[in-house]
Image: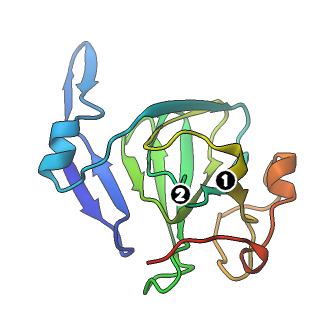
Amino acid sequence: MKVIKTEIEDLYIIETKIFEDNRGWFTESYSAKKFKDNGLDIEFIQDNHSLSKEKGVLRGLHFQLSPKAQTKLVRCTRGSIYDVAVDLREDSPTYKKWFGVELNSENKKQFLIPKGFAHGFLTLSDNSEVQYKVDEYYAPEYDRSIRFDDPEINVDWGGDNPILSEKDKNASLLKNSDCNFKY
């Protein structure tokens, strides 16, 4: 397993070893031991799986408030997505900064997003499937969203007029959010 640091502290790209032959390929997509060996001591408790039928679906920016914040380990197992994390930890040197990475079924990269970050993705192909592990259960009363086009954050999604859910269309700006993350 290869852990790649990004320019934002605690935000990592994970690459697993791929064993390939004439039959196809195999990878160990998650190993608690290998994570611990790399200084990542996270107890994942739930797996989630989504399908976005069309290219241009944007899901996010989502997070759960403390004390129900979630660490996520995200991968795209079918199709392709542009995955984004935004640092919402007040007093962090990278507060309001974002980082994006393409995840797809070909590169098999994973994105480790810690507590204190908002998460979202834009589908780059039809029928994109995303699977992710979390270390905290979904808690609707702590669930929040920030607008994907918040000018304070200014994520470059690389496209116009994304397909949004009602929840994401009605998301608040960060300045109007009750986000409670500290660095």
Which residue is at 39% across, 74% downward? 8
Which residue is at 23% across, 55% downward? 3
Toward the left, the furthest residue is 37
Residue 40, image x, y percentages: 24, 53
Compare residues 134 and 51 and report the one nearer the observer.
134
Does residue 132 appear in the picture of this structure? yes
Residue 147, quarter of the rendered image: bottom right
Name the quadrant of the C terminus: bottom left
Q: CA distance from mark 2 to mark 1?
A: 8 Å
For label 2, the residue is 67
Name the quadrant of the N terminus: top left
For label 1, the residue is 142
Q: According to the image, what is the colour scheme of the structure?
A: rainbow
Which residue is at 34% across, 55% downward? 13
Which residue is at 49% across, 76% downward? 182
Residue 138, image x, y percentages: 60, 40
User: Could you tell me the amino acid type at mark 2?
Assistant: Pro
Q: Is residue 5 left or right of residue 159?
A: left
Q: Which mark is residue 25?
A: none
- Is 7 rendered above or below residue 2? below
Compare residues 60 and 76 and report the one nearer the observer.
60
